[in-house]
Image (cartoon, grey):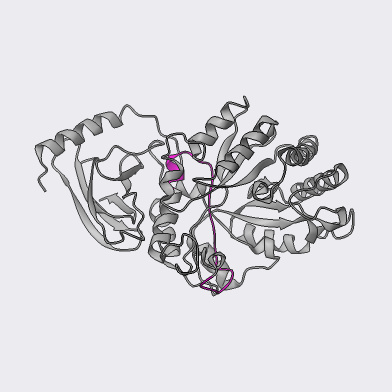
Amino acid sequence: TECSATMAASICLMGLLTFALSAQAQLRLRDIAAVNQHWGLHAELPSSSELQAFQALGIKMSRTGMRWADIEQTQGVYNWTFYDQLTRELDSHDVGTLWCIHPQNPIYNATTGVPNDPAANKAFSHFLVAAIARYNNPNITFWELSNEPNLADIDPRTYMDFVSTSVQLVRNTNSTALASVVGPALGMNVVDKEAVVWLEAVGDLGLFDLIDYVTVHWYRPGQPETATTLNGAPASVAGVRQMIESRTDRNVDVISGEWGYTTANPAQAHHPVDETTQANYITRMWLTMLASNVRLANWYDWIEDCDDDGNRECRFGIVHPDASPKPAFVAARNLLTKLGDAVLDFTGHWPAINGTVLSFDTQSKFAVWLNVNTNYTAALYRPVTFTAKAGTYQAQDVLEIQSRVKVCSDELGVVEVNASGTPVVLMSE
């Protein structure tokens, strides 16, 4: 294939720039890709078919809930039976867990949000230490102390009293001192200024001096890339990192704790997408978070928990209620199969014209896509051009549409691929 002199010259300049960028970060997609599942929150063990599908997806991390009220129904007495069973199931499939603790318990008059008196805070902290001591193992990686407290109108001071009591006891107990405590599971979207103000308030009160990671739910009505391409805006990954760095000297980073797109009926749901777009967005969300060096990226949700097409909450899953796959499952599985264990060459995007490119395994594998809202432009294809090692590449998009891409005879190599909102994986032959 011949390339124009202008295009080749531009690409050569990008290729030279590439070698001046940061060293390999040794990041792998399978290390950060995760899904949220509700087995713990609903106190229901997954069916065998659901577990088989979960294992076939190929992830190594998930987020699920743990209800304090289900375990401690008599003061000081813990019943771990269900969570013992669930933990064994997850461990047997080598799936790590971010436990999101729901800290409501009526026996301590803690019925909404987080506990709001010293006695309830103390009781919860003892429960948390008991849970961590019981379940902390290489697969139980994170302990999240609440879920979206800002959306429950929890006062920042009340939240900080709750967190500081719990973290102090965790750190002062030998069996739990090294556990990763994370939070606040901030409910956010791209235009939500109140969420940013709330996070700044708890940050000013010392939250970032207590926890190990800041968990944020990056819900938004459009492209997942906007979570990292808003040039440091407060509702972006860079903006939250700047907020943290300005308030603590500790090495505290961000986690994408929960985030997804519903495929509910457009006539009845707010900001839905079609199933192809959902498939594109799960893969692009994971790739975008990987390129931004985010430690964990939890997709919401694993399974459709109900079967009402008009209820947006029913259609966030990537498998149907019977565990049969939606296109999002197929795309996520294919992405992890092809790139899950590949090493990202450096954080950030590979220089390219017209699209987004990530490079893996010393330019032997690439992910290529367009940043488009593909529920409106599903049929749009546009050439994306970048430099790579000279040779022949096998290309397949994550929804299993095959094509072959030839590299131009340039000393750096020129690759041109017709791309859309569906990521294409290129692998050198």
Give the image quarter of residue 402: bottom left
The residue shown at (80%, 34%) is: 172
Q: Is residue 65 visible?
A: yes
The stretch of residues the image draws in magenta is 287-310
Give the image quarter of residue 364: top left
The residue shown at (45%, 69%) is: 267
Give the image quarter of residue 12: top left
The residue shown at (82%, 60%) is: 79
The residue shown at (24%, 41%) is: 353
Query: Quick one: which residue is furthest to the right in this view?
Result: 75
| Residue 294 located within the stretch drawn in magenta | yes
Image position, residue 263 (x, y; %): 46, 65
Front in this rendered view, residue 285 or 198: 198
Residue 276 left/right relative to 310: left
Q: Is residue 334 visible?
A: no
Front in this rendered view, residue 149 or 16: 149
Image position, residue 60 (x, y; %): 54, 53
Image position, residue 374 (x, y; %): 35, 58
Predominant secondary structure in magenta? loop
Residue 265 left/right relative to 395: right
Front in this rendered view, residue 122 or 387: 122
Residue 13 left/right relative to 307: left
| Residue 16 located within the stretch drawn in magenta | no
Residue 144 left/right relative to 279: right
Image position, residue 360 (x, y; %): 36, 43
The total number of labels drawn is 0
